[in-house]
Image (spheres, grey):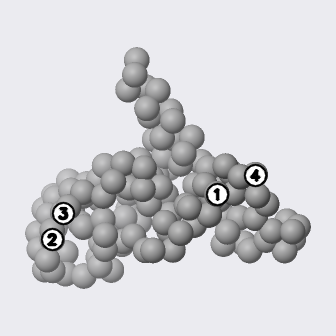
Amino acid sequence: MSGAVWFWRYGCPAVLFEYPYVAQSPTAYDRVEFNSVDEVWNEIENIVEETKGSTRTIGQDLFFLVPMFANPEDILDDWHYEMILEWQSSKMLNLPISDTLDNASALKVDSFLIIESEMIGISNYENKKKK
């Protein structure tokens, strides 16, 4: 979800990798053969681990690093964008996500928190670029 927010905001680059392929691993600093989307997800897990404690968000790192070794479309699902649009509608129209917090879906609450956090990260990133 974190990366989807950044790709939603800035667009998804047209990167074409066909399995199997060799690409530079941003965590191993070496060329690695990727044979499946599962191996891409393993690399993403490594990126997430390295992002912990960073001033950058997970989404920011994924936005800049994933296109270097994989097709972002392989890891993005329609539900990510649907959830972002729900968050945007809820925020802009001041609509609650549920009648009570107890009745709100855990997935929706978690997703909305991630989206909000990444949007703050995008705002911070854009403000730094302006300076």
Residue identifier under label 4:
94
**What whole-number distance in Å separates the C-alpha atoms at marks 2 and 3?**
6 Å
Q: Amino acid at mark 4?
A: Asn
Q: Amino acid at mark 1?
A: Ser
Is residue 130 toward the left or the right of residue 35 in the image? right
Mark 2 residue element: loop
Residue at the extreme front of the image, as rendered: 93
Q: Residue at x 33, y 80 (%)?
A: 38
**What whole-number distance in Å separates the C-alpha atoms at marks 4 and 1?**
8 Å
Give neighbour class at mark 4: few <14, some 14-19, many 20+ (Cα, 10 Å): few
Residue identifier under label 2:
17
Residue identifier under label 1:
89
Which one is in front, 90 or 19?
90
Of callouts 3 and 1, the N-terminal one: 3
Of callouts 4 and 1, the N-terminal one: 1
**What whole-number distance in Å separates the C-alpha atoms at marks 3 and 4?**
37 Å
Displayed quadrant of residue 11: bottom left
Residue 65 visible in the current orientation: yes
Mark 1 residue element: helix
Q: Amino acid at mark 3?
A: Val
* Percent x, y of residue 79: 51, 74
Q: Amino acid at mark 2?
A: Phe
Q: Is residue 77 above or below residue 27?
A: below
Of callouts 1 and 2, the N-terminal one: 2
Residue identifier under label 3:
15
Q: Residue at x 31, y 74 (%)?
A: 74
Q: Nearer the viewer, mark 2 or mark 4?
A: 4
Q: Nearer the viewer, mark 1 or mark 2?
A: 1
Q: Residue at x 42, y 56 (%)?
A: 8
Of callouts 3 and 4, the N-terminal one: 3
Is residue 55 toward the left or the right of residue 62 in the image? right
